[in-house]
Structure formats: structure tokens, C-alpha cells
Image (tube, grey):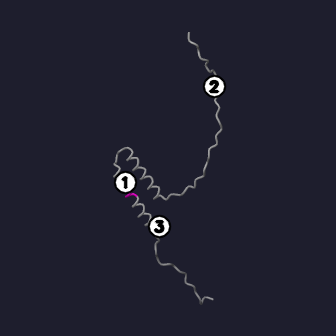
Amino acid sequence: MYEEEPTITEETITETATEEEVEEVELLELSPLELEFFLTRSDIWDKLVRNEISIDDAKKLIDTLYTNLVSLSKASTSTKRGRRKTLKSSKNSS
């Protein structure tokens, strides 16, 4: 009645060997302050994606976060000025 199509009883799967291109990326060390900035920023994005906050609120939060980061990083990198201790040399000790 109907002609049966030949069935494939054994499939041979050939995988071509592919080489991945690997580019070395220099990893930078993050300060705890920078790490906290990135984590907080990602939390803001998560809330935005889940529609928990509006776009305007997210912009305000990120702007506030950035200004806090800049002000805190300036405060942490400022040098403390103080009196320099010097050793008194004794000229008459010989």
C-alpha cells in the first residue's frame, strides 16, 4: 500500500574538533568600596527588571550611589598630614 521509507538504523555522529579562542584578561583588584558599589548597582538593576522600582527611581539611586562612591573614595585616598618625626643626631658624641 504505502512504500516504506528506509529507516536509518545507525547514525554516525561526527563531532568536529573545534579550538576555542582564549584571550587572557587582566584581572584588576577591586577595593571593598568598589565591590560594594557593583553589588548595590546590580541590586538596583534587579529591582528595575522585576518592576519593583521605576526607571526614574533607578536613575536617582544610581546617581546617589555614584556620588557616594566618589566622595568616599576621595576621603579614603586623602593623605593625612602630620608632623614628621626626625631623629636628632648627636654631633658631640664622638
Query: What residue is at 56 percent from the left and 55 percent from the top?
Result: 27
User: Please, what is the three-letter code of the amino acid marked with disc 3?
Assistant: Thr
User: Please, what is the three-letter code of the amino acid marked with disc 1?
Assistant: Lys
The quarter of the image holding the C terminus is bottom right
Residue 82, given in percent of the width and then of the height, sits at 46, 76
Query: What residue is at 44 percent from the left and 66 percent from the top?
Result: 74
Kindly state the secondary structure of the residue where label 1 is placed. Answer: helix
Residue bounds of the magenta highlight: 60-65
Q: Are marks 2 and 1 in contact (CB under 8 Å)?
A: no
User: Please, what is the three-letter code of the amino acid marked with disc 2?
Assistant: Glu
Query: What residue is at 51 percent from the left and 79 percent from the top?
Result: 85
Task: Indicate yes or no whether the magenta region holds residue 63.
Answer: yes
Q: Please identify the quarter of the rendering in which residue 88 is found.
A: bottom right
- Foreground: 50 or 75? 50
Residue 47, given in percent of the width and then of the height, sits at 38, 47
Residue 59: assigned label? 1
Kindly state the secondary structure of the residue where label 3 is placed. Answer: helix
- In the displayed orientation, state which residue is furthest to the top: 1
Q: CA distance from mark 3 to mark 1?
A: 27 Å
Kindly state the secondary structure of the residue where label 2 is placed. Answer: loop
Give the labeled residue for mark 3.
77
Q: Residues within 10 Å of mark 2 (few under 14, many from 20)?
A: few
Q: Please identify the quarter of the rendering in which residue 18 is found.
A: top right
Give the labeled residue for mark 2.
11
Q: Mark 3 or mark 2, which is nearer the start of the sequence?
A: 2
Residue 66, given in percent of the width and then of the height, sits at 41, 59
- Seen in the picture, residue 15 relative to 76 is either above or below; the reply is above
Q: CA distance from mark 2 to mark 3?
A: 66 Å
Q: CA distance from mark 2 to mark 1?
A: 56 Å
